Image (spheres, rainbow, N blue to C red):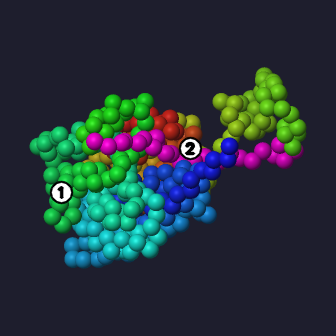
Amino acid sequence: MAEHKSLELHIAMFPWLAVGHITPFLHLSNELAKRGHRITFLLPKKAQIQLQHLNLHPNLITFHPLTIPHFDGLPHGTETASDIPIHLTHLLAVAMDRTRDQVENFLRATIPDMVFYDNAHWIPEITRQLGIKAVCNNVVSAAALAIALVPARVVPKARALSFIALPFGDGITFYDRVITAMKESDVISIRTCKEIEGNLCDYMANQFGKSVFLTGPVLPELVKKPLEETWAKWLDGFEKFSLYCVWVQNLEKNQFQDLLGFESTGLPELVKKPLEETWAKWLDGFEPSSVLYCAFGSQIILEKNQFQELLLGFESTGFPFLIALKPPMGCSTIEEALPEGFEERVKERGRVYGGWVEQPLILSHPSVGCFVSHCGFGSMWEFINHWKPPMGF
């Protein structure tokens, strides 16, 4: 019998223009590239610069830059949702829709086998003409979709969900955009797993009358540290499962880890991109599991009084803390928004930062013991992955 050769596909990725969507699309791209598939990732140049370090397979994953058009109402230079306050996000949807010609020209020139997208509801109109499969890939939970974004649901009047009835682009609501994106797709995928949301995924499949595939959490890949050549060569000389592991007692924990290169679990140490030195050095100065970390994603901007009350709350805990938030409304910098006397009181115990931080690396630091989060789905997977107790805000 002839040996079966795996099918190598060319896949285009076009996520919603927000870091919380682009990042899981890129993690999924890594998983697909690991299996030999070629990926072209359509995204703005600014996002490429910010996230290209997450590309683990640059020989198979290439970035195709998109120019985000400017128009009245959308702040100049806007490329992703991180660049604007959340109340202007509907204008970013208009801008994304205006990249349609760029996306269509790329698809016509390359004819990939399939396109993964989420909020660009017009993708299936293009792919049907070209014989390309359209996969609506949802990075939010199945629960979030099933509660309101299905055909059987009347648009809810509940205040917490009222945003889905608001405009999200020219002449289209958020509800209609998402429903159309899933209805018109060839298949739906969701960033979840059967063990957590199996029944809800079955419900989604029933509602839309099509297959629903689950990608799993697609978290950042950890790369094993290469074994020292002396030991690697020695171990290669034995059959699989033929060696015994001898437990050495009466060593200090750090001595044991230094000697064997093992974590306390006995698993090989995993090496990730190092945390930026500024944060690593600061976090290293605290006891394990003592630091409170707070972040609300890339889009949430608080009112100044909310921002100050939050900081005063962290100050009152007596614990060290790192808060990564954008400057509040009406303030151009974090410094001008701080409560009076805040820096003098907290000194080195607390840091408030308004720029970009690499959240997975911060959560993996042993000094971090609690994550105060807005409970976005991406953040949820990250605190599960690093076993940091969350506190929803």
Q: Which residue corresponds to the image point at 29% horizontal and 63% vertical from the top-left? A: 125
How crowded is the residue under tag 2: few (<14 C-alpha within 10 Å), some, or many (20+)?
Answer: some
Does the magenta run of residues contain 222?
A: yes
Given residues 133 and 337, the one toward you in this image is 133
Specify the segment rendered in magenta: 209-232
Q: Is residue 235 left or right of residue 16?
A: right
Type of residue at label 2? His
Quarter of the image with the N terminus in it: top right
Q: Is residue 19 above or below residue 96?
A: above
The residue to which callout 2 is attached is 365
Q: Position of residue 288 (x, y in %)?
A: 57, 36
Q: Which residue corresponds to the image point at 41% horizontal and 42% vertical from the top-left? A: 213
Q: Position of residue 182 (x, y in %)?
A: 29, 50
Numbered mark located on residue 302 in the image? none
Q: Which residue corresponds to the image point at 40% horizontal and 61% vertical from the top-left? A: 132
Secondary structure beneath disc 1? loop
The kind of secondary structure the magenta stretch mainly shows is loop
User: Can the viewer see residue 315?
Assistant: no
Does the magenta run of residues contain 225?
A: yes
Q: CA distance from mark 1 to mark 2?
A: 41 Å
Secondary structure beneath disc 2? loop
Given residues 195 and 336, the one toward you in this image is 195
Furthest-left residue in view?
157
Q: Nearer the viewer, mark 1 or mark 2?
A: 1
Q: Position of residue 188 (x, y in %)?
A: 35, 47
The residue to which callout 1 is attached is 173
Quarter of the image where one finds residue 273: bottom right
Q: Is residue 106 above or below residue 149?
A: below
How crowded is the residue under tag 1: few (<14 C-alpha within 10 Å), some, or many (20+)?
Answer: some
Q: Position of residue 261 (x, y in %)?
A: 74, 39
Precedes in sequence: disc 1 or disc 2: 1
